Image (tube, rainbow, N blue to C red):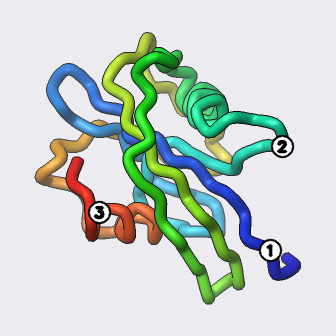
Amino acid sequence: MENVVRVGVGVYIFNQKKQVLLGLRKSKHGENTWCPPGGHMEFGETNEQAAIREAKEETNLDLNPQNIKLCGLTNDFFPENNRHYITLHFFCHDFKGTPELMEPNKCVQWQWFDVDKLPENLFLSNRNFLRNHSL
């Protein structure tokens, strides 16, 4: 990959029990780490459109566009594969559907976690975000 900075999005989706949805990554980029649904922003998308699209593609959940809130960003450098991202972190508390594994080549499973009992092995951008923010 050439030396470019890409824009990523991640959506912390919360259920009625105030748990957050995380997926166990399968791809070489962050393999065996947990993260919320997310991915790359596409040309011409708004921040919110990217978050909604990625959540739908990965989980089949329909997020309420009026409930998507940008809560912070991180500057994430992955030296192991020479990737650099600015990651936009969103919160959403209003959605329809039940999480489904839509991309089994990228994710092992989706699981709800209590916000005070998150797994240790979080994806780098999520660790960076949680240093300065709480769920």
Residue type, numbered disc 1: Val
| CA–CA distance in space, label 3 to label 1 | 25 Å
Residue 42 vs 101, above or below: the answer is below
Of callouts 2 and 3, which one flags the residue occurring earlier in the amino acid sequence? 2
Q: Which residue is mark 1?
A: 4
Residue 65 or 80: which is nearer the viewer? 65
Q: Residue at x 29, y 62 (%)?
A: 130
Residue type, numbered disc 2: Phe
Residue 68 or 1: which is nearer the viewer? 68
Q: Residue at x 49, y 20 (%)?
A: 63
Q: Residue at x 63, y 68 (%)?
A: 85
Task: Tell which tag, 2 or 3, sits nearer the viewer.
Answer: 2
Q: In the image, residue 109 lies at what x, y percent?
A: 46, 42
Q: In the image, residue 86 lies at what x, y percent?
A: 60, 64
In the image as oriented, which residue stretches furthest toward the top?
Answer: 96
Q: Which residue is mark 3?
A: 130
Count of marks overlaid on the render: 3
Residue type, numbered disc 3: Leu
Residue 86 vs 60, above or below: the answer is below
Helix, strand or loop status at disc 2:
loop
Of callouts 1 and 2, which one flags the residue occurring earlier in the amino acid sequence? 1
Residue 113 or 51: which is nearer the viewer? 51
| CA–CA distance in space, label 1 to label 2 | 15 Å
Q: What's the mark number on residue 43?
A: 2
Q: In the image, residue 87 lies at what x, y percent?
A: 55, 58
Asked whether the viewer can see residue 8, the reply is yes
